[in-house]
Image: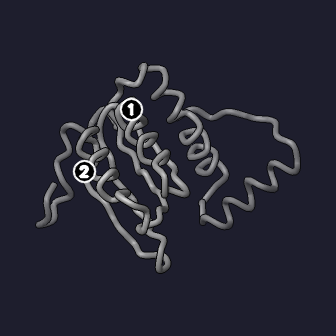
Amino acid sequence: MQRITITIDDALLTAVDDLCARRGYGSRSEAVRDIVRDALAPVRAAETGGSAACYGALSYVYSHGTRDLARRLTGEGHEHGVSIASLHVHLTHDACLEVAVLRGPVARMQSYADAVVTQRGVRYGHLHLIPEGDDARTHPGHGDDGPG
């Protein structure tokens, strides 16, 4: 690990210190590393032309009363083939939150996210990309009785 020095204005440093306190970081260095990782994830994904494998979380709020929306959303999921798990929560009588865990090429995940969030009846959507590490293909498990 390398040690670096940065110059930062007082207001921004106060914001970093507040972030450290809110999230419980042990040091500014840990917070800055996470901030840099978050900033670099989409840049690295874009540099591969969308071919890099990654994980993602697509969260969106939709109106379950919108005609044929559930059928259209299911169709998009089958067409793109990147969803590996999902969570469904009823927020109100009409609004549902869906969180889909994705894995696959960045371009296909982005295409799926675009197809979902542009549907009539979807009110909010965000795709969060998580780069797949070099060791992800050989994950040995956690040593518990559950799946690896």
Total labels: the figure holds 2
Q: Is residue 147 left or right of residue 12?
A: left
Q: Residue at x 35, y 43 (%)?
A: 55
Task: Give the x, y percent position of residue 60.
Answer: 47, 57
Judging depth in this view, the residue of 120 and 126 nearest the camera is: 120
Q: Secondary structure at mark 1?
A: helix
Q: Is residue 16 left or right of residue 106?
A: right
Question: Which residue is labeled 1 in the image?
Answer: 106
Q: Is residue 143 left or right of residue 57?
A: left
Residue 6 in the image: above or below residue 87:
above
Give the quadrant of residue 148: bottom left
Numbered tag placed on residue 84 in the rendering: 2
Residue 52 in the image: above or below residue 34:
above
Q: Secondary structure at mark 2?
A: strand
Judging depth in this view, the residue of 103 and 89 nearest the camera is: 89
Q: Is residue 59 left or right of residue 31?
A: left
Amino acid type assigned to the residue bearing label 1 in the image: Val
Numbered tag placed on residue 141 in the rendering: none
Task: Give the x, y percent position of residue 5.
Answer: 73, 34
Q: Residue at x 59, y 37 (%)?
A: 39
**Of the image marks 1 and 2, the number of the one nearer the N terminus:** 2
Q: CA distance from mark 1 to mark 2?
A: 14 Å
Amino acid type assigned to the residue bearing label 2 in the image: Ile
